[in-house]
Image (cartoon, helix red, strand yellow):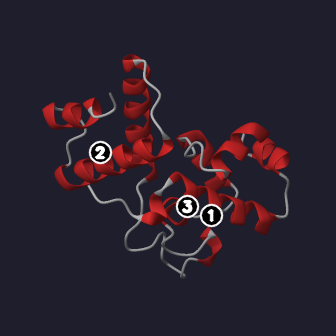
Amino acid sequence: MSESANTTAEAIGERLRAFRTHMGVSQDRLGQLIGGTKRGVQDNENGRNAPQSKVIAGLVGLGLNANWLLTGDGPMLLSDLKVGQTAPASALDVELLEVVIEKLEAKIAAAGVRASPKKKAELAALLYDYIVETGKAEGPSVERILRLVA
């Protein structure tokens, strides 16, 4: 699978830092606003971890365009989307992304392994794309993708 440079944990972290700077808040304050911690924000901004679904939901609540955060596509802010447009044409389904992240995290925990942010991002993208293309969130192919964690 080829990986887009825009979807790596490092690239996502850079966009998160840009959003935080745009808001004019510290890492500690952003953590408070999204129900997280300063350390979590630091780890996300430094590319050590990709943001979890709870963090993404909190950021969206602050007006961040999740599609921009995760892919670099579209405007940074939801308020900058065109009138009548709820998301860019290649919109990210945040609910589906949450399902993908939950499945991936459960598999990682069950396997007792530590996956790098890059590997997590690659697997999340692969699983997300598979579910979008097939409409199937369960089954043998999903399990084969999840086994790539180990």
Q: Which residue is mark 2?
A: 127
Kindly identify the residue that appears in the image at 71 percent across and 60 percent down.
17
Real-space CA distance between mark 1 and mark 2, rounded to the nearest whole angstrom: 23 Å
Kindly identify the residue that appears in the image at 28 percent across and 33 percent down.
146
Q: Which mark is residue 11?
A: 3
Dot 1, crowdedness within 10 Å: few (<14), some or many (≥20)? many
Say whether marks 1 and 3 touch (CB < 8 Å). Answer: yes
Kindly identify the residue that appears in the image at 20 percent across and 42 percent down.
136
Real-space CA distance between mark 3 and mark 2, rounded to the nearest whole angstrom: 20 Å
Real-space CA distance between mark 1 and mark 3, rounded to the nearest whole angstrom: 6 Å
Left or right: where 140 falls relative to 36: left
Label 1 element class: helix
Q: Position of residue 9 (x, y in %)?
A: 53, 52
Q: Position of residue 15 (x, y in %)?
A: 62, 63
The single residue placed furthest to the left in the displayed view is 140
Picture mark count: 3
Q: Position of residue 19 (x, y in %)?
A: 70, 64
Name which of mark 3 and mark 2 comes first in the sequence. 3
131 to 73, vertically: above or below: above
